[in-house]
Amino acid sequence: MLFWRGENFSLERLPADRSRVIYPPEPLAGIEDPEGAIRNALLNPMDADPLPTLLKPGMKLTICFDDASLSLPKMRRPDTRQRIIEAVLEMAAEAGVDDVHLIAALGLHRRMHDYELKHVLGDRIFDAFHPRGTLYQHDAEDYDNLTVIGETEEGEVLEINKRVAESDLVVYANVNQVAMDGGWKSITTGVASYRCLSFHHNPKTLQNTRSLMDRHHSALHKSLWRMGEVLRESGPQIFTVETTLNTNTFPKPFDFLAKREWEWNAKDRATYLATQKSLSAMPVKARRKIMHSIESPYEMTSVQAGFTPTVHEETLQHVYAQHLVEVEGQTDILTMGIPYICPYNPEGVMNPILVMCMGLGYLFNMYRGKPLVREGGVIIMTHPTYRDFNPVHHPSYIDFFEEVLTDTTDPAVMSEKWEKKYAEDEWYRHLYRTGNAYHGVHPFYAWYWGAHGQQHAGKVIIVGGDAPTVRRLGFTPASTMNDAFEIASDVVGRAPTVTHLHVPSVLVADVK
Amino acid sequence: MANPYMKRAQKLAGKAESAVRQATTPLRNFGFPFRAPTVPRGVEVPPEASGLGAHYNTDWARRPLASSIRGVITEGPMRLAARILTNPEVTGVDRLASLQRLETPPPVIFAPTHHSHLDTGLMIRSIPLVWRRDLVVAAAADYFFNKKWKAIISALALNAVPIDREVTGRKSSDMLVKLMDKGSSLIIYPEGGRSPDGWGQDFKGGAAYLSSKTGAPVVPVFIDGTGSIFGKGMKRPKPGSTKVVFGAPMWPEEGESTRRFNARIEAEATVLGDEALTDYWSARSRAARGESPSLTGPEHTSWRRDWDLADRRKLGAAGKRRRAKRSWPDLG
Amino acid sequence: MRALQVRRNVAKLGMARIASAVSPTMAAKMGPLDLRTIDDPSCPGGTNATGWHQVKTRLAGICGSDISLVEGHASTYFEDWVSFPFVPGHEVVGELESGQRVILEPVLGHAARGLPLPFEGASPADGDDYAHLAMDSNGGALEAGIQTGFCCSTGGGWAPWFWAHESQLHHIDGSMPDERAVLVEPLAGGIHAALLSLPSLAGIENPVVAVLGAGTMGLAAIAGLKRYVPEARIVVGARYSHQQAFAKALGADVVVPDSQLQSAVRRQVGGMVVGGQLTSGAHVTIDAVGSNSSVVDALAMTKPRGRVVLLGMPADVTLDLTGLWHRETELKGAYTYGTETLADGSTAKTFDLAVDTANHFEAERLLSATYTLADHVDAIAHAATAGRRGAVKIAFDLRTGDS
């Protein structure tokens, strides 16, 4: 079975009689004329008036778009967001709108580099708006530019970007690669403040989120939808554009990775061996560079626009159509290979905290109904887990690893004891606002993302990781998969059933 | 010191002449068939079909051997020369992405603005590979095909097909339609010829007509800067930088006349020109207001046209030398 | 007697220095230190004969300054302050003829040299004038030398016995094992450095003291801080895991790998990082490493108008002092011990504080290995690479009667 291990892969043996493998579904066909489909969606929206009728001269138009954490990996140019925004801008130009701002809705993520903005928006839009200062990135620590819209019935305060709040029309360009994103989440997290986010980005909410990909059983999404109501009542007019992608993740040299192992022909096997050997021979930095240069040939499978909740329900149909895999029951052990990239390290290093976040946060949560592994079961992940951090992108992660994790790995304890200090640290704030660093509190959120998985599993084992680092995460290190099964037998006995999650590409297991 | 050489050359020529004369003396006594016949009185010899100009047959250039030779020339020396002379910045190719990624990309009619002979080489270099492989250029019959050697080079290196400039003759357009049906894409210059004064000329309907005939989309392309590098009337090319902006593919609408479609193509090229020199958003905004600066320039004559042309050129890539600009310190 | 002796040999010193780059064992073999049969030293009392005793060595520690000398790294500064040939060894617990066990306070001060004390109750290292250390005294019987262990007249700890003046001897009772007593001298050095931080911490709430390096001297400084500067938050950067463990055991508040010390200090005091330097920093940083880079690092993590205490003996260091000038940092050397002024204003002898501290922390934990004089090459090599090999203090054990 093919397992990802950071910037490389390995083949592991799983017990034959007791294992099952969950493969992602075949990629659906993409729309042949994406520009036409987008125009059509803008002219025939759901539960809203056609976009040209909403555009008037002299109005304040703000276009927000998903940041570099989507898509993973980045897609070939032109990006979906470029197509959407160009279509919107053309209509805006027709209508004579002059005051247009484009805002990267990054929440507490890091600011995007110029080349990332160019990749997502295309050179035309970048060259037209960036020099004028009308293309910029949301700053959650700029208190002069945040306003409170209102409060939900549970006392959650919705505080968002001032320009967004005061616009006549806000268009949001979504790339809905996974079921977690989109809907009311886009604006209530993407252009919100730390105060606003702390109402739902906390251990308690996330432990009750079962799962991140299933909004109807997610405490996180319930909170977001409550805030969405406030937004609908007291916020600006919002025109949402959502698009879904197929799972065409790998370009030519790497497309054997998407095939199931029993489909590999001689050429694929040779390519795999050659790739794996040459990657192993390279230093980590070179490997990382190659991996991060992958541009996925994703194709758009649907586009809908208009009133946010209606649009989102339609989008979810398409997302699930591509991602859902029916699975019968749970097993004792869940195995997965952790790739080199997660939403919080595009173009960067996957540090140990993000390994936990990707494994127990994202991959564990790719289910609907019940998790793939039974409660108290064992999760086995493969990743080199080196103690390496990108000091430009993740400065607060370095300190989190040294200071917080040496003290506790319990999300509830760390949120009480340490979160405030990191959220208010001047240095991290400075780097978030002026550099390309994630917000000081972000490592906590990455950790909370895995809180449900951490709570659910009886033991978590990382194969191939750096032992002291793995222990600091609160997990058990193992050198080989066999050793991992040995260690697991303490918890699940000698003949456990095993599920292997064959990612990427993305999938959602519908577990009965 | 030309004279001593001239003298020597003459002497040599003289010697050669006498040698030939001596060798051909025996033949002088013979007539036809060793010598050309004379025409008897009263007979009028009809003129032969010239085989050049619009009638030149370029089929041979599409045979496999010629195609591979052309492939080598295109990908090698031509691309290199294009880069050295014109240092192009190519944008807008992502507008063609959807067409490019289809299973079988359809043939496309590229309709660039035209200021220099370099335009064709530049286009061939900038067009994405899926269309570059099978590309035909419509070239002016009276310029490129009036001499045999010119015809051969044009056909071989550029896969050029002769067309009549003023009137799209039946023969040329049929030939082009046939080639496109076979899958070739086409480069045709709607302005008909290179700009004589640096400003653009009105678009003729050839591209629009062919599009409605074949169903292939028209992609307008704005090329900026080649006029200053090797414009009409220049003896030698002056290297500089250029900008190539591809537009979005355009199809004729239901029942649209060729003339209307052509006007639409010209309007799009105008906006592209605005985009190339300023930015995307300003260009679109101005287009919506009807304020796009015209490619054909102002209505004035003589020096004022040139004056405005210089202003326009300052905005673009024309004549920008690769040498770093001197930056003088601010002493004030 | 058979003892380890350092003879002045420039060539050997040079070779040792070069060899030390390859391995400390090579340096020890090639260096100027050798086990030889030497003449028994005669009483250095001379005109001041009373008060001198012969001390039989029980345990003698190996110190960083000894290694520096033996490996040829020591600065030429000491040319005038040592007299060749000498027997090294100044961290000694020994035994008098009467059987009374004593700890040596090695500085050859005024009393030993028959000179008036600088003030009532002064310790050997006290005083404003160091002249007597570099001159012959006692009518020539006692040559120049800063300490026993650097003086040719007294002998030194790396020998079966040596001469010591009563002003240098501290009596200990049976409750203190030898292994603990041999740590007293280094502890005194650490406590002295720790107390040198007091002036800079006066009147400060929540002061932070950073300690760079957790070898013997660093750990001694931590012990001193914990006991005598209790209000300070101690942040330690230690390279090896056993050093980190010891630092934590001694009561340091935050212990991190040495490369992380700057970030750890920043986490404690706040502030930002500009140009690789903290904009604020620790109130006092104790540099217990003493290398080129450690001084630079210490300056980078000390707050403006803070103090850097140099505990480890540095040699020739190239330093850009612009940062120090800009930040008005104090650079203070910490040498041995003497009479201290504590936080509450009382005075005490450092050695007494050190005995007290050694008993409190059970300092014998820090003694990692002992060797006989014959194994001096291994002993020096072990001491030179103590950190990497999981050791802290190495000592010579002469109790079995080595000859």
Image (cartoon, coloured by chain):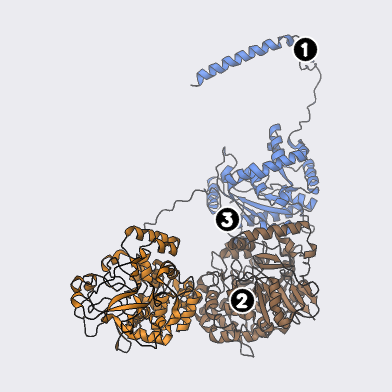
Chain colours: A brown, B blue, C orange
Check the image and report above or below for B110 versus C240. Answer: above
Chain where mark 2 sits: A
Q: Nearer the viewer, mark 3 or mark 1?
A: 1
Q: Where does the image place residue A138, in percent across and percent down from the top left?
A: 57, 74
Tell me the SS state at disc 2.
helix
Q: Could you tell me if the residues under marks 1 and 2 are in contact, i.e. CB atoms within 8 Å?
A: no
Chain where mark 3 sits: B
Amino acid type shown at disc 2: Gly
Estimate the spatial distance between the alpha carbons at disc 3 and disc 1, rounded to whole Å: 70 Å
Tell me the SS state at disc 3.
helix
Amino acid type shown at disc 1: Gly
Q: Where does the image place residue A466, in percent across and percent down from the top left?
A: 60, 71
Mark 1: few/some/many CA within 10 Å (<14, 14-19, 20+): few
User: In front: A387, or A45?
Assistant: A387
Q: Where does the image place residue C154, in percent across and percent down from the top left?
A: 27, 73
Q: Could you tell me if the residues under marks 2 and 3 are in contact, i.e. CB atoms within 8 Å?
A: no
- List the residue tagged with mark 3: B277
Chain where mark 1 sits: B
Disc 3 or 1, which lies upstream in sequence?
A: 1
User: Does C300 sit left or right of A459 as displayed?
Assistant: left
Estimate the spatial distance between the alpha carbons at disc 2 and disc 3, rounded to whole Å: 34 Å
User: In front: C292, or C123?
Assistant: C123
Estimate the spatial distance between the alpha carbons at disc 1 and disc 2, rounded to whole Å: 97 Å
Instruction: Give the numbered dot on residue B31.
Output: 1
- List the residue tagged with mark 2: A190
Q: Nearer the viewer, mark 1 or mark 2?
A: 2
Q: Could you tell me if the residues under marks 3 and 1 are in contact, i.e. CB atoms within 8 Å?
A: no
Instruction: Give the numbered dot on residue C344.
Output: none
